[in-house]
Amino acid sequence: DAGVIQSPRHEVTEMGQEVTLRCKPISGHNSLFWYRQTMMRGLELLIYFNNNVPIDDSGMPEDRFSAKMPNASFSTLKIQPSEPRDSAVYFCASSFGENSNQPQHFGDGTRLSIL
Amino acid sequence: GEDVEQSLFLSVREGDSSVINCTYTDSSSTYLYWYKQEPGAGLQLLTYIFSNMDMKQDQRLTVLLNKKDKHLSLRIADTQTGDSAIYFCAEIGGSGTYKYIFGTGTRLKVLA
């Protein structure tokens, strides 16, 4: 069974550039989460979608960050313009259900380095 | 607010048992999870326990939950070098919530 698929696995870009991270959730899952992981702050929830609708974006750090989910099988997280402090590993996770106790399944992440 | 705490490091010898501990503050937690993260990889769900259970066993893994003390542990029997990873404890609150509260992770090092 295919798990959560994220692309790219690694991204290195210069400060000021636009960065787009992509996620394909597990088929049939209707909840999707974007997380950021850093040594200093651990895992932070950035945004949560349910049935393609953003439910909670309170974790999005700044207006430079935006996320979309145009359909049930695809989501993007965009940073524009990027800054060195955005360097982190970004994870996408999906689960089944709303307000769900079903476990979240994580992708392998995108390791982002902003120079 | 809710908080989940774990010790940062644990070192064990191959073949011994490992016990990774976690404490949480949210008394309305319904499910508690253990995830494993290997270098360069995402979080892999290992097991989870519903809050009305005291224990759950799954092959080499045993989860113990002490709800009164808000203490969760993960025991790995016959620890192998492949078990070296970071282990995260996470909890989710009562009905109507979706947000996991993650611990800081415990880095397990298995010595050959």
Image (cartoon, coloured by chain):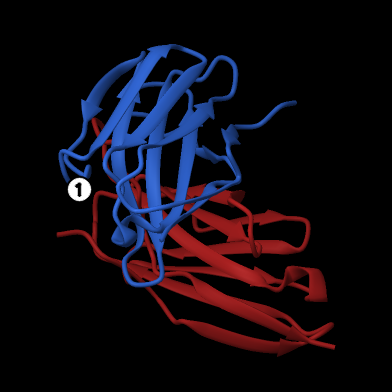
Quadrant where the image shows the N terminus of chain A: top right
The chain whose colour is red is B
- Whether residue B100 is situated above or below residue B71 in the rendered picture: above
Question: Looking at the image, which residue is at 54% across and 57% down?
Answer: B34
Residue A61, given in percent of the width and then of the height, sits at 20, 48
Q: Left of A47 or right of it: where is A106? A: right
Looking at the rendered structure, the secondary structure element under dot 1 is loop
**Disc 1 chain ID:** A
Q: Nearer the viewer, residue A110 or B55?
A: A110
The residue that mark 1 highlights is A61
- Whether residue B55 is situated above or below residue B10 in the rendered picture: above
- Whether residue B72 is situated above or below residue B52 in the rendered picture: below
Is any part of residue A37 visible from this angle?
yes
Identity, as a three-letter code, of the amino acid under mark 1: Pro
The chain whose colour is blue is A
Q: Residues within 10 Å of mark 1 (few under 14, many from 20)?
A: few
